[in-house]
Amino acid sequence: MSTDVLARTEPAPTRGKPAVTSATHHVETVLWVRHWTDQYFSFAITRPASFRFRSGEFVMIGLPGEDGGKPVLRAYSIASPSYADTLEFFSIKVADGPLTSRLQKIEPGDQILMAKKPVGTLVLDALQPGRRLFLLGTGTGLAPWLSVARDPDVYDAFEQVVVAHCVREVRDLAYRDLFQEELPADEVFGELAVNQLTYLPTVTRQPFEREGRITDLITSGRLFQDAGLNQSVFDPESDRVMLCGSMHMIKDVAAILEAQGMAEGSNSEPGDFVLERAFVG
């Protein structure tokens, strides 16, 4: 992927930058940074020994305010699975964004602020039991699926896990190699990936093996066809769905799901599909 740069995995002190301190947040160290394109990047930080989370949850992370101002924090889905010893995140780059304009410049050895408690509804606990789990995301909405799709408990709960990732251009398909090559070849995870995981990348602005928005794939029936299913709509008895990404996609797909007889779930009342309202508003 064109501007892919993977920084060294061992952090080194960043010269000229003052140490970060906080009485209310964890202060963690950047381990590596990977720039996929001029729009997307990923990074990993150290994980506190006391930090526990469920695959699919998010946490507030950020940087100290400039010139001693208030810290700038935003909600980020944790992209690493719950058993990982580091914490990975997948972010968009916004030139004038209060946080990402600075965050995209981090280097190994820099320090990041992180809230002490993760939260979220994109978790198994918020879904009723089912046979198939659809993880539908646009852009950096892939982040929670990177966590969920690498959690062995998910494959105990569902016979098939379908990850559909929609982006504008082919180069924006970050983590494509993870799903198509690395997971199937993994010594521990490989059998699950080969037998139960289906990855469906789709692009909206370039010729590709699969073109169109997620809503188009659903309404045309291609989502189900490409997942190897003999159906043209969601089955409320068997299918469970998680949504993350653009507000328009989430609202449009949620409306489709409700029209097909599916109910939104939460941690307190599990349902047929879930979305992250902290991101939608």
Image (cartoon, rainbow, N blue to C red):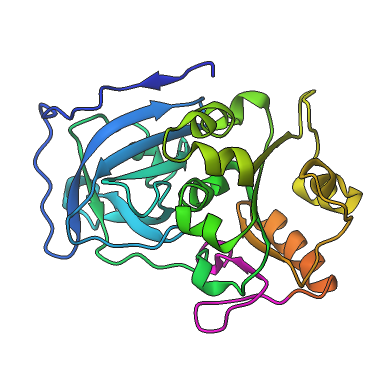
Specify the farthest residue to the bottom.
Answer: 268
Q: Which residues are magenta?
A: 263-281
Q: Does residue 184 appear anywhere in the picture?
A: yes
Considering only vertical position in the picture, is 136 above or below 102? below
In which quadrant of the rendered view does residue 180 lie? Answer: top right
What's the residue at 46%, 40% (across, down)?
A: 189
Q: Nearer the viewer, residue 16 or 255?
A: 255
What's the residue at 56%, 63% (across, down)?
A: 157
Q: Main secondary structure of the magenta part?
A: loop
- Image quarter in which the N terminus is found: top right
Considering only vertical position in the picture, is 116 above or below 210? below
Specify the farthest residue to the top.
Answer: 2
Measured as percent of width and height from the top left, residue 96 is found at: 45, 39
Magenta residue check for 277:
yes
In which quadrant of the rendered view does residue 34 lie? Answer: top left
Relative placement, left or right, of 278 versus 210 is: left
Measured as percent of width and height from the top left, residue 43 is found at: 35, 36
Measured as percent of width and height from the top left, residue 142 is found at: 55, 45
In which quadrant of the rendered view does residue 272 lie? Answer: bottom right
Magenta residue check for 231:
no
How many numbered tags mark residues here? 0
